[in-house]
Image: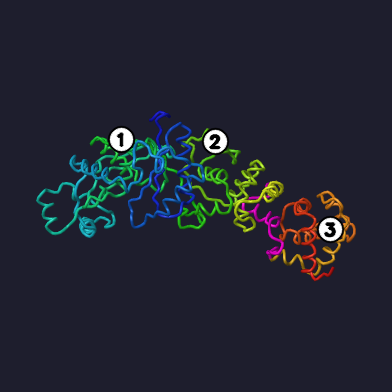
Amino acid sequence: MSTPSQVRVRFCPSPTGTPHVGLIRTALFNWAHARHHGGTFVFRIEDTDASRDTVESYEAILDALRWLGLEWDEGPEVGGPHTPYRQSERGALYADALQRLVEAGEAYESYSTAEEIEARHRAAGRDPKLGYDNADRDLTAERKAAFRAEGRTPVYRLRMPDRDIGFTDLIRGEVTFRAGSVPDFVLARGDGTPLYPLTNPLDDALMEITHVLRGEDLLSSTPRQIALFEAFARVGIGSGPPIYAHLPLVTGEGNRKLSKRDPQSNLFLYRDRGFTPEGLLNYLALLGWAIAEDRDVFTLDEMVAAFDVSRVSSNAARFDLKKAEAINSAHLRRLPAEEFARRVEPFLRSEGVIIGTPTAQQRALLAAAAPLVQERSVVLSDAARMLRFLFVDEAAFVPEETAAQAALGPDAAPVLDAALTSLDAVESWTSTDIEAALKASLVDGLGLKPRKAFAPVRVAVSGRTVSPPLYESMELLGRDRSLHRLRAGLERAGGVR
C-alpha cells in the first residue's frame, strides 16, 4: 500500500461526446482522493479512436474541469514528467511495450477466427458464445507461417495466468476471479495497432499510477489488467498492479445506468441553467459518498478534508434532480451578496436585458436587487428571470407568461385603477410608503384579501406572477417606471384613465 505522499490517481476520458455527470463524478472522487492525501491528480486523454474522437469533445472536457475548479497537476496544457498525456501521441511507447511482451512470451500471435472458435466450442459440447478458447497459445513457427500464407492477419493476445486472480477493492473488499474464467485477450491488431486493453494499463504503469478509482462497470476487466500489470513488471515496465476502487454506478430513470446519451446526464445543461460549480460538485459527491449521516451541504475543501474512498457505498446511486436543485439552492444562499450578483450577471445577458458590459447604473441596480431573490433562487437563471423586469426596456416590456396575462383580465381594472390613485399621492417613493398606500387602497379601501389585491399589481409591474418582494421591487424600479407599467396594465385589463 502506498504512503499518502506517493498517491497518484488519473482521470482518463475519451473525447467522444459531451461530458456527463457520471464522468465528472469519477473525476471528482479521483481529485478528492489525491488532494486528501497530498498526492497527484493526473489528467490523461484516451484519444486513439480516430473515428469517434473529436476536437470539440476534447475542448469540452477541459472546459468542464476548469469551470468546476478540478485543476489537474499533470496533463494536457500543464505538462509533467510523463508527457505526452494524449494517447494519440504515445504510439512509440505502445509499440515498445508490445514488442517486449511478445519477445518475453507474455503475449503471442493468434490467428483463430470467430467462426473457428465457435465451431470448436460446439464440437466440444460447450456454449458457442464462451469466447476465445486459448487455442493459439502454442502455435509452432510452421503453423504461423501457414496461416500467413493463407493471407491471415493475427492479433496479439496476453497469456493469462493459470491461477485465480484476486485483489482487495477499497470499496468492495476481497474480489476473486477463478482460474480460466478470463480468456487470453487481445492487446493489439496484427499491424501493431494498440487497443484499449493495452494502452490504458500501460499508461497507468508508465505514469506510476498508484490508485485507480473507476466505475463498477469496468470491474470485469480488472483481472485482465492485473495480469497485464504483472506481465509489464516482468519485462521491466512499472512495479505491478495499482490499488483499485470501483465506484457505484450512477443511475437515472428506472434505475438504468445514466448513459451519456441521456439528456439528464449532460453536464453543460446544468451550467446553462445556473447551477454553481460548488452546488453541482457537492451533489455529485453525494452519489455514493457522504460527509456525515445528517449533513448534505458542504464545501469542496470540507470534502477534501473528510474524503475516504473506503467509505464510498457499493450500491448504485440514483441521480435525483430535485435533490441536486436543493443542494444548489443552499449554495446560492451561502454566497456573499456581491458574489451572487456577479454570478447572476451573465444570465441577465442571456435574457437579453443586459448587452455587453453592464453600465454603472445597471451594476448598482443589480447589487441592490440581487438580495431580494437570493433566498428564492434554485439556480442562477431563476434569479435572472425574476430580476429581468428591472432591466428590460419599457417599450419591450409585456407580461410573457400565460398566467400573468390572465391576471390582467377585466377583474384587474378596478384594482389597478385604485392602486394608481393611491400611488400618485405617495410623496416619498420608498417600499414602506408604497406598502402603506397599496394596503390602504386595495385591502382597506376595496376590501380585497392581500393575494387578490396585489396579484394584478405584481403582474403589471414585473410581468410575472412570481417576483421579488413587491414593494422593494417598485422602489428599485422607480416612481415613473412603476406608474407607467401600472397604467399599461390597466389598459390591457380594459380600464381607462
User: Label for residue 301?
Assistant: 2
Q: Nearer the viewer, residue 179 or 324?
A: 324
Dot 2 and dot 3 residues touching (CB under 8 Å): no
Residue type indicated by callout 2: Asp
How many numbered circles are shown? 3
Q: Kindly identify which residue carries mark 3.
A: 449
What are the residue bounds of the magenta stretch?
Answer: 374-401
* Whether residue 249 can be seen here: no
Extreme residue in the right direction = 445
Q: Is residue 493 left or right of residue 264?
A: right
The CA span between labels 1 and 2 is 32 Å
Please name the residue shown 51% across and 42% down the image: 69
Mark 2 neighbour class, 10 Å CA radius: few under 14, some 14 to 19, many 20 or more:
few
The CA span between labels 3 and 1 is 76 Å
Mark 1 neighbour class, 10 Å CA radius: few under 14, some 14 to 19, many 20 or more:
some
Q: Is residue 434 left or right of residue 175?
A: right
Q: Kindly identify which residue carries mark 1.
A: 240
Please tell me in which quadrant of the rendered image residue 174 appears. Answer: top left
> Can you give x and y, in whole percent of width and height, for residue 400 in the image?
68, 64
Dot 1 and dot 2 residues touching (CB under 8 Å): no
Element type at marker 1? Answer: loop
In the image, is residue 399 part of the stretch drawn in magenta? yes
Please name the residue shown 48% across and 48% down the image: 64
Residue type indicated by callout 1: Gly
